[in-house]
Amino acid sequence: MITLDAFIQGDSIEIIKNFPDNFVHAIISDIPYGIGLDDWDVLHDNKNSALGGCSPAQISGGGLFKRRGKPLNGWSEADKKIPAEYQKWCSQWAKNWLRVLKPGGTCFIFAGRRYAHRCIVALEDACFTFKDMLAWEKNNAPHRAQRLSIIYERRNDFEAAQEWDGWRVANLRPLFEPILWFQKPYKTGGTIADNILENGVGAWNEEALRKYNAYEDTFSNILKVNITQDDHGLHAAQKPLKLMELLISLVTKEEQIILDPFMGSGTTCIAAKKLKRHYIGIDIDSENIKIANERLNSSEQYEIAL
Ligand SMILES: C[S@@+](CC[C@H](N)C(=O)[O-])C[C@H]1O[C@@H](n2cnc3c(N)ncnc32)[C@H](O)[C@@H]1O
């Protein structure tokens, strides 16, 4: 028996194995990106000390990342396996996500830019259709690309500093995040229109884009939703509530069921409740379940106060 409108604490890879077939209308999840943002985000077996360790800035709490996410001195054989290990981790849950989703149903996954391709391959191999890659355009993101001239000046190599003035290392400002859009294949021989009548999913709703997408072309696959003050402070990877409302209302109707197997502070579920959808949220960390319950209670009070 499945309890709807509930948060479950535990390993979603194991928990979902016991869920029935074809019962959720959408799976919407901000999965671990595998880049070492926190302990739950280390999804490889590499014991390389640079990867497992912390820099002085990370120890003193100045850095966002708890551990180094990439090797500092090039690729050892163990380092090279990290992307494939991430794909293997995605394969552990992909088949069961397909099984529990209704035919034609959507699976939206937030995956990091570095390993999103691995997630796509794992879900394709599990027989999902990869429908599109949406871009969530953020209003801001930290920019850490170092100036080469400063590095050389610190070494007193003023000639190199002058030659490389205006050049930087590391990434451009990461102002978009990919949202992967997968669909569960529907009955062979039937049309999508038949499937929608049978299973209630497979289409997208224009009104959701008009209401939430601030991008100049409302129907584009670039979704512009700002991070507001209320979207901070509950989880290191917290997503904006309005963005989750957009995704939920884009592919589901009221009373349908949304599953988030990596729910963190529960943003997907709070948005689902607000939009009168049923939800099931799972997180391995009991602290997150507590935070999500507090959020849920305060959102109820807020609704009553209105
Ligand atoms: C990227 S965060 C989600 C944050 C969320 N978008 C929010 O707004 O708060 C991913 C979450 O997955 C959880 N997690 C990692 N592995 C898990 C597992 N095997 N089962 C359930 N939850 C897991 C982590 O505890 C983390 O909170």
Image: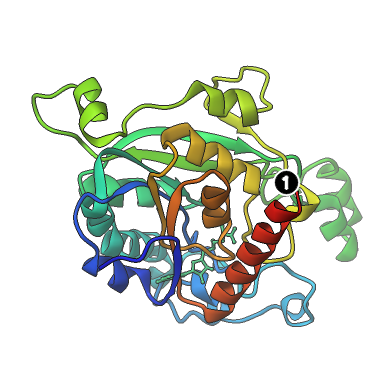
Residue 129 placement, left or right of 257: left
- In x, y percent, where is residue 180? 43, 41
- In x, y percent, where is residue 18? 22, 69
Residue 291 placement, left or right of 182: right
Q: What residue would you read off at disc 1?
A: 227
Q: Name the residue at 77% across, 47% down.
A: 228
Residue closest to the eye, 284 or 120? 284
**Quadrant assignment, res 235:** bottom right
Residue closest to the eye, 177 or 292? 292
Residue closest to the eye, 74 or 78? 78
**Quadrant assignment, res 81:** bottom left
- In x, y percent, where is residue 130? 32, 37
In the rendered structure, which amino acid carries the disc numbered 1? Ile
- In x, y percent, where is residue 249? 50, 36
Q: Is residue 48 above or below residue 77?
A: below
Q: Name the residue at 70% across, 60% down.
A: 301
Mark 1 residue crowding within 10 angstroms, few (<14) / some (14–19) / many (20+):
some
Q: Name the element at disc 1.
A: loop
Colouring scheme, one of rainbow, by chain, secondary structure, one colour: rainbow
Q: Name the residue at 59% across, 38% down.
A: 136
Q: Name the residue at 63% across, 27% down.
A: 211
Residue closest to the eye, 167 or 102? 102
